[in-house]
């Protein structure tokens, strides 16, 4: 019996490697991924590309569970990737998990 | 946990606005029930006049459609009048027997029109002008009746008269006063208004007092008789003589009322569970009938209902506009003048323009404009700010554009603009787009417009113009941005509050500030964090610790982010002086890292544009030069001319002076960027007249100028002091900059800071008080002492994670 192969989890770094209320970048030929850490150590991963004009979200200021794009201050929710109203747009999300302080990312 | 129950009596603009504010602050706090006596959802009462005039339909003026109530889980009882409040059992009872219990009750019962107690007031055809029902009755009457008489020459009366005239009736306005709008206009302006309305075919009877409305045998009104014995035909009579706060319900419940339900600065009635907002309240003895104050009340009331408990309503300054298309009038404050006031008047009756400004104690206290109201918003702003206007006095009458205060070319005149004209040059937003958003989305403030249209959200130079567009579109429902603005949406505290708390309570960390000032968000936002970070560092140098995550990317990585995500690198070049070795290294770096563009900057330096983030540290290492801080809210550069060393006109060594200043100020963070220049003679080749601190050499010493700005809005620096020695130049300019660093609000340039506190104040602190000057200067030197060059620190390994990716995946 063939089961669908789940996307493998790739270990990226430890939680401590990402600054609190900051982010780090995973470089990838098909578009960089920004990995964020909130004040409460929740980790999020989004395509490092603002839905507005493609600004690098990883360079923005992280607050609560959202990030403000450094180029034109769009406000992106880290959990959903959605821009805050009245702006409309969505940055792609990537599954991410933390186990024993290690951060894993699922890519396709 | 069971939610508290909030019941709102009154489904009008004040009550619903309070709910909107509350839902932003505490969306989950209450189970909300609203009673509305009218069978409609909340609509914009202000726009009834355009509906009457046939310029808008009722559907256009609905603010909150029924979906809105549903979406927010609000139970809505339409067409039910609350008749009783049982304060002991804490429940309200409606006429149809509906009972709703409450934990908090909000009364927003509005007002009722005052009906003159004259015989015939109950005849058919006699109506007031208050709601959509009255408006529709007038529209119907206009189809079959001929003679309309409007009693009352106030705002509402004139708007009603204008609407009825446009609908084809013969209209006479009866007014007891000597001129129209005597609560909004002085006599001259009132007469001009009357003249222009007469040209539109309205008739006026001033100084007439109604004695009786005469009816026919069917009980319909047919004429009005006056106290002087005259009478005129009238088959429609509109009473617009004023409003009375609707306090019957509150009074029957035993709440203290005195020409309105009496409330505290928290909008709380004498029963602490009961709040009241809008036209039904009396606050500090005043009942307001315009919309802007209601919105301010709503904000404060919501704050208390949400249990934040820090808002205070202190009353409102009012401004008025008449919504009659084609007639521009504006008034605000004490426009009549009186003892101890001065007046500046411009009167051009033939041209239909009249302007009066009332000044008291060097401050603008009132304005009355007719015919040309483009500057109304600006005067209103000056009035609310209570700013001294003696420096503007010569130009005050000619408006904001005359002092070049609205933009690069002094463009203004929102009213005269076409819909296709651009208002916001940064984001390409036209007037039409803004007007459409204001009307369709029900926007009331500049902040709303910024959010929805992006106008004025980048450089901000068009904020005044956007304000004017808002004002022209909204008329008297225009809500001016509050004078003391909150830092951001995370708090109601102002920049002044934050600075004071940090200083007086020695707060040393972000967490301490957010905790002490009760921020609503756990760790601020992209607007407040950089500001608080700066306040901490500037107030407690060497004690507060810099938080890189609270800095904008440019200041975090010490380079300037470009639109493609690359960075620009500008090394320090003190006084604009370089040498062959530095230039060679710059050239080598440009080759080695394939820098796409090398450009000479306006600040006499060299910019390497398009450097990749991961190359930054290597580029700095290879350059072997210090950071030019061209990316920060910090010292930027000191521009110089060649001075007495080479120039035949030079009177002092301006180049060396510039180098010394730049050395002294290296690594200085500030509320906004700081630029200096030193010129060797009054020809001023270094353009010192548009710098935060400009130094001009003269034969006998140095002249210092402050508050110049060559940016968004060109500002000429003002003369500050004349000194003799180079050491004094450093001390005076250092002390001035330290005062600015300690007192200005984040993102205020020196010109804005001086505008707020006044040049006299700054001179008193720096020029006239030698001891204080020395103390300031020493504090500056202390806070700069030992600060490392940020590039050197990073070459040595600081903040390494910023510049390398976590992992590279194929």
Image (cartoon, rainbow, N blue to C red):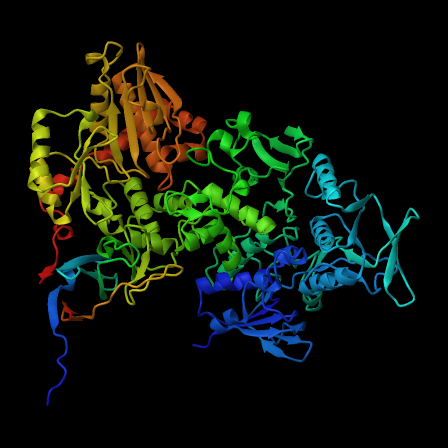
Q: Residue at x 60, y 54 (%)?
A: B291
Q: Is residue B741 above or below residue B690?
A: below
Total labels drawn: 0
In front: B559, or B214? B214
**B526 left or right, relative to B163:** left
Q: Is residue A87 above or below residue B98?
A: above
- Image location of residue B8, percent across then percent down: 58, 68
Work out whether residue B238 or residue B799 is closer to the camera in this orientation and state it.
B238
Extreme residue in the bottom direction: A1
> Which of the 4 quarters of the picture holds residue B734?
top left
Give the position of the C terminus of chain B as an image quadrant.
bottom left
Residue drawn at 73 percent across, 53 percent down = B242
Relative height, residue B191 to residue A47 (above, below): above
In the image, residue B355 above or below residue B444: above
Residue B413, given in percent of the width and then of the height, sits at 52, 38
Is residue B546 in sight in this rendering?
Answer: no
Whole-percent x and y of residue B61?
58, 61
């Amino acid at each position: 019996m063939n089961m669908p192969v789940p996307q493998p989890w790739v270990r990226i770094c430890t939680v401590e490697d990402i600054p609190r209320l900051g982010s780090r970048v995973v470089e990838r030929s098909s578009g960089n991924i920004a990995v964020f850490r909130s004040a409460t150590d929740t980790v999020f991963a989004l395509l490092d590309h603002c839905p507005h004009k493609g600004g690098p979200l990883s360079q923005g200021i992280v607050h609560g569970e959202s990030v403000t794009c450094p180029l034109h201050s769009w406000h992106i929710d880290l959990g959903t990737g959605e821009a805050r109203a009245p702006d409309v747009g969505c940055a792609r999300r990537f599954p991410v998990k933390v186990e024993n302080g290690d951060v894993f990312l699922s890519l396709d | 946990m069971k939610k508290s129950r909030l019941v709102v009596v009154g489904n009008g603009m004040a009550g619903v606005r309070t709910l909107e504010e509350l839902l932003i602050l505490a969306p989950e706090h209450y189970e909300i029930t609203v009673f509305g006596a009218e069978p409609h959802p909340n609509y914009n009462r202000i726009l009834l006049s355009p509906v009457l005039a046939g310029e808008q339909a009722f559907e256009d003026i609905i603010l909150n459609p029924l979906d809105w109530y549903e979406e927010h889980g609000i139970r809505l009882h339409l067409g039910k009048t609350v008749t009783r409040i049982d304060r002991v059992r804490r429940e309200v009872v409606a006429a149809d027997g509906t009972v709703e219990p409450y934990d908090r009750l909000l009364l927003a019962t509005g007002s009722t029109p005052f009906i003159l107690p004259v015989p015939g007031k109950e005849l058919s055809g006699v109506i007031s002008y208050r709601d959509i029902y009255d408006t529709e009755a007038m529209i119907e009457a206009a189809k079959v009746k001929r003679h309309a008489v409007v009693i009352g020459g106030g705002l509402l009366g004139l708007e009603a008269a204008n609407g009825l005239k446009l609908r084809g009736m013969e209209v006479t306005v009866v007014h007891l006063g000597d001129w129209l709008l005597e609560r909004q206009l002085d006599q001259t302006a009132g007469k001009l208004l009357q003249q222009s309305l007469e040209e539109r075919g309205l008739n006026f009877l001033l100084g007439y007092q109604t004695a009786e409305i005469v009816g026919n045998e069917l009980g319909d009104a047919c004429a009005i008789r006056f106290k002087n014995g005259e009478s005129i035909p009238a088959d429609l009579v509109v009473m617009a003589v004023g409003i009375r706060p609707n306090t019957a319900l509150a009074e029957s419940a035993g709440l203290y009322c005195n020409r309105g339900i009496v409330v505290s600065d928290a909008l709380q009635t004498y029963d602490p569970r009961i709040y009241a907002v809008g036209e039904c309240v009396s606050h500090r003895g005043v009942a307001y009938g315009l919309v802007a104050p209601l919105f301010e009340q709503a904000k404060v009331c919501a704050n208390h209902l949400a249990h934040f408990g820090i808002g205070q309503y202190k009353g409102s300054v009012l401004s008025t506009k008449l919504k009659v298309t084609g007639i521009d009038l504006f008034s605000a404050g004490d426009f009549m003048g009186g003892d101890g006031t001065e007046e500046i008047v411009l009167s051009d009756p033939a041209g239909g323009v009249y302007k009066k400004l009332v000044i008291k104690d060097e401050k603008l206290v009132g304005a009355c404009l007719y015919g040309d109201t483009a500057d109304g918003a600006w005067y209103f702003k000056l009035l609310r700010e209570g700013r001294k206007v003696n420096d503007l006095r010569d130009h005050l009458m000619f408006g904001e554009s005359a002092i070049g205060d609205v933009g690069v070319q002094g463009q203004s005149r929102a009213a005269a603009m076409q819909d296709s004209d651009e208002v916001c040059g940064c984001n390409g937003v036209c007037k039409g787009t803004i007007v459409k958003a204001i009307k369709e989305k029900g926007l009331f403030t500049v902040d709303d417009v910024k959010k929805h249209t992006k106008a004025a959200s980048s450089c901000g130079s068009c904020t005044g113009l956007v304000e004017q567009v808002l004002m022209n579109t909204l008329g008297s429902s225009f809500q001016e941005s509050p004078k003391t603005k909150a830092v951001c949406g995370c708090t109601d505290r102002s920049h002044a509050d934050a600075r004071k708390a940090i200083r007086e309570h020695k707060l040393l960390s972000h967490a301490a500030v957010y905790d002490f000032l009760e921020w609503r968000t756990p760790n601020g936002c992209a607007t407040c964090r950089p500001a608080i970070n700066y306040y901490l560092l500037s107030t407690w140098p060497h004690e507060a610790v810099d938080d890189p995550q609270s800095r904008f990317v440019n200041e975090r990585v010490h380079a300037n982010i470009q639109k493609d995500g690359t960075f620009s690198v500008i090394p320090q070049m003190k006084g604009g002086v370089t040498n062959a070795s530095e230039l060679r290294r710059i050239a080598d770096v440009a080759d080695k890292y394939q820098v796409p563009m090398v450009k000479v900057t306006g600040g006499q330096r060299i910019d390497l544009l398009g450097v990749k983030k991961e190359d930054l540290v290597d580029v700095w290492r290879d350059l072997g030069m210090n950071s030019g801080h061209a990316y920060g809210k910090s010292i930027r550069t000191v521009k110089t001319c060649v001075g007495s060393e080479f120039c035949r006109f030079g009177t002092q060594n301006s180049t060396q002076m510039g180098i010394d200043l730049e050395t002294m100020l290296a690594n200085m963070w500030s509320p906004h960027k700081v630029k200096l220049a030193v010129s060797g003679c009054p020809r001023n080749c270094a353009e010192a007249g548009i710098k935060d601190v400009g130094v001009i050499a003269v034969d006998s010493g140095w002249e210092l100028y402050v508050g110049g700005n060559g940016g968004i809005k060109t500002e000429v620096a003002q003369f500050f002091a004349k000194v003799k020695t180079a050491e004094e130049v450093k001390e005076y300019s250092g002390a001035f900059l330290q005062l600015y660093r300690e007192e200005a609000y984040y993102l205020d340039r020196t010109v804005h800071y001086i505008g707020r506190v006044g040049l006299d104040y700054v001179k008193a602190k720096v020029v006239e008080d030698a001891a204080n000057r020395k103390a300031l200067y020493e504090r500056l030197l202390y806070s700069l002492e030992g600060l490392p060059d940020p590039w050197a620190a990073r070459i040595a390994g600081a903040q390494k994670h910023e510049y390398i990716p976590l992992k590279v995946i194929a």
